[in-house]
């Protein structure tokens, strides 16, 4: 499994490599001393796992994740940052406090999803269902798997992401998102909303050739007349 | 008069109250003895017979003494002393009036009775009664003025003493509260780096452990002395920066300069340390390319001038999120507590530098 260490202190990177040397399954493919370098290396090396320091010069760890279309699995490393850690609500693999203990690292690595990477690979240009996006809303953060997202909704220049009981905003327009979402999995129901086809519980015909869709949390979405035709085609496949 | 002063006035101890009481009776006795002498002299000069003069003066003395003593108990019962001074005027006038009426009535009855017994009756005239009443009123009013002014002066003094006491207590409390802590982020990073350093440079890592323990010891003990020699503070700052160096490596460049004359001057401990820490935490740590920290101590016009500058841009205070505000506040308050107006502290942008500077005027 390919790992990238993102950490501004050289000695801290050395320390982490030393600790990882006994874990054969982890191959450290690169090291980045700041977010800018990390962005380039993530593009180049496509790592499966990030060891990510939160406090870095320039962009911090969260800002780095926000700038990525899809985030790899993430283990945070931090010296002392209760505030940042508490803000993390969802799906971060783990976080490690420096100096890192051997057994604590082993435990974190034990949580890694070592399954075949197929699902995590992008399908063509699209995000795979198991890929995750980093969402930060105010002081709360989530790493959300694409397949767990029920609905995207327009909100000015932002989009609102619905998953579980949360609905934070991300800094992407609905059109930008549509380009990156697999059309076999996500459908543009109308100008305002993109829905997850696997999270639909009921569909009924509506007025003027439109359709009414109930999501699995009973949220209602109308499919516009123009989209309803495509929607029927898609489902009859 | 503020509330706390009044509370202290009414909460004085048993001993103070007894002392107060003694003083009152002495003043009361001396005052009325004076009155007796005057009354006697006045009567004699007026041409009254000696016996009548003495008897009536004694009666005036006794009745004035006892009536005013009773009146004092009434004042205490009504707690007039706790009223603000300007609100005491009408009660005091009213008190003087009532006491003087009773006093005049009893005095006149006694006076005419004595004359009657001595078989030298004098006929009662309202003008005489009025004159008598005005006299007694003036005496009683004077008594009130003396009584209340004594108490208000007492209260004023006591509240001033109390204020000083509170100030001293507040200062002590502040100094105790102002314990600056070593930034935990720095500490754990240092430990982590030292751990890694053992892999490549054992002697240096051993040295770093000593630095870290020196800094920790210094930060735990510094409250024990309000001021310390500059060279000791600089030694700690240097150790601190060496530790930062293993974290930031080529990203951190630093230089400490101090003129010989400054080295034995006194500074509040942990001031330069906190400023250096801020320079690194808010300056260097945010610069991907790193930067410089320059520390300089010099003597200019009989004033110790301490400057800590770092590359970067001064961030507007965001006190809620970090403890930058607390550190700077800590320095500022300790300087004020120890040096008052003789010390100043400023934080400013100076070209490409963030400059923190402390000036302590030396006593001449």
Image: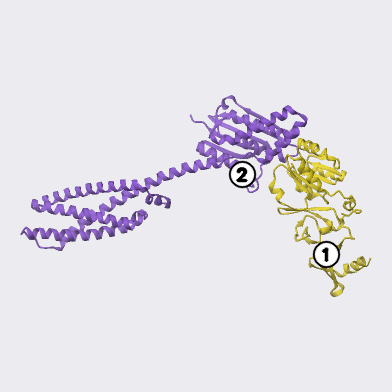
Chain colours: A yellow, B purple
Residue B264 versus residue B273 in the image, above or below: above
The circle on residue B325 is 2
Does the rendering let one see residue B241? Answer: yes
Question: Which disc is residue A191 wearing?
Answer: 1
> Quick one: SS at disc 1?
loop
The vertical placement of B288 against A117, above or below, is above
Q: Given the image, what chain letter belongs to the residue carrying mark 2?
A: B
Residue A46 spot, x, y in % from top left: 87, 46
Task: Judge from the rendering whether residue B211 lies leftward or rightward of residue A36; answer left or right.
Answer: left
Q: Quadrant of the C terminus of chain A?
A: bottom right
Please say whether residue B351 is visible from this viewpoint: no
Relative to residue B117, is residue B154 drawn left or right?
Answer: right
Who is closer to the viewer here, B363 or A7? A7
Q: Are marks 1 and 2 in contact (CB under 8 Å)?
A: no
On what subunit does the disc labeled 1 rest? A
Quarter of the image for residue A228 reads bottom right
Determine whether A18 is above or below B23 in the image.
above
Please give left or right for residue B185 compared with residue B111 in the image.
Answer: right
**Who's the residue at 51% across and 39% down the image?**
B337
């Amino acid at each position: 499994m390919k790992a990238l260490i993102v950490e501004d202190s050289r000695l801290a990177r050395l320390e982490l490599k030393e600790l990882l040397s006994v874990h054969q399954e982890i191959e450290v493919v690169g090291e980045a001393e700041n977010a800018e370098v990390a962005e380039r290396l993530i593009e180049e090396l496509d790592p499966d796992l990030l060891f990510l320091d939160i406090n870095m010069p320039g962009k911090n760890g969260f800002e780095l994740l926000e700038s990525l279309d899809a985030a790899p699995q993430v283990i945070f490393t931090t010296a002392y940052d209760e505030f940042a850690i508490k803000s993390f609500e969802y799906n971060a693999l783990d976080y490690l406090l420096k100096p890192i203990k051997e057994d604590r690292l082993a435990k974190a690595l034990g949580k890694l999803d070592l399954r075949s990477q197929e699902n995590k690979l992008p399908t063509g240009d699209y995000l795979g269902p198991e890929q995750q996006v980093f969402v930060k809303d105010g002081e709360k953060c989530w790493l959300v798997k694409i397949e767990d997202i029920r609905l995207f909704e327009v909100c000015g220049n932002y989009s609102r992401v619905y998953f579980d009981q949360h609905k934070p905003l991300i800094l992407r327009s609905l059109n930008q998102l549509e380009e990156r979402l697999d059309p076999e999995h996500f459908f543009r129901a109308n100008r305002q909303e993109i829905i997850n086809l696997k999270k639909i519980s009921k569909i009924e015909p509506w007025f003027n050739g439109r359709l009414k869709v109930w999501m699995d949390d009973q949220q209602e979405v109308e499919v516009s007349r123009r989209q309803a035709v495509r929607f029927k085609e898609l489902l009859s496949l | 008069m503020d509330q706390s002063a009044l509370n202290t006035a009414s909460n004085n101890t048993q001993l103070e109250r007894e002392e107060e009481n003694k003083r009152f009776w002495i003043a009361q006795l001396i005052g009325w003895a004076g009155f007796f002498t005057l009354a006697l002299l006045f009567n004699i000069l007026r041409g009254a017979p000696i016996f009548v003069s003495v008897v009536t003066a004694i009666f005036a003395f006794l009745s004035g003494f006892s009536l005013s003593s009773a009146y004092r108990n009434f004042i205490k019962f009504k707690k007039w002393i706790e009223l603000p001074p300007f609100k005491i005027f009408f009660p005091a006038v009213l008190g003087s009036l009532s006491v003087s009426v009773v006093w005049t009535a009893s005095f006149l009855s006694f006076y005419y009775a004595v004359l009657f017994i001595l078989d030298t009756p004098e006929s009662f005239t309202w003008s005489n009664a009025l004159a008598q009443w005005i006299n007694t009123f003036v005496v009683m009013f004077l008594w009130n003025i003396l009584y209340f002014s004594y108490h208000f002066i007492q209260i004023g003094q006591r509240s001033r003493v109390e204020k000083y006491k509170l100030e001293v207590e507040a200062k002590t409390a502040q100094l105790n509260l102002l314990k600056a802590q070593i930034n935990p982020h720095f500490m754990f990073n240092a430990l982590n780096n030292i751990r890694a350093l053992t892999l490549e440079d054992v002697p240096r890592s051993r040295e770093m452990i000593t630095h870290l323990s020196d800094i920790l010891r210094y930060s735990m003990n510094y409250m024990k002395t309000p001021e310390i020699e500059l060279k000791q503070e600089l030694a700690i700052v240097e150790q601190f920066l060496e530790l930062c160096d293993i974290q930031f490596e080529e990203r951190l460049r630093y230089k400490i300069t101090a003129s010989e004359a400054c080295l034995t001057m006194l500074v509040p401990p942990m001031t330069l340390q906190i400023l250096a820490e801020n320079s690194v935490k808010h300056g260097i740590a945010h610069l991907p390319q790193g930067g410089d920290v320059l520390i300089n101590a010099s003597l200019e016009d009989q004033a110790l001038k301490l400057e800590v500058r770092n590359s970067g841009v001064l961030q507007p205070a965001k006190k809620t999120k970090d403890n930058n505000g607390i550190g700077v506040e800590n320095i500022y308050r300790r300087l004020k507590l120890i040096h008052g107006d003789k010390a100043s502290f400023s934080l400013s942008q100076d070209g490409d530098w963030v400059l923190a500077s402390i000036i302590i005027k030396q006593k001449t």
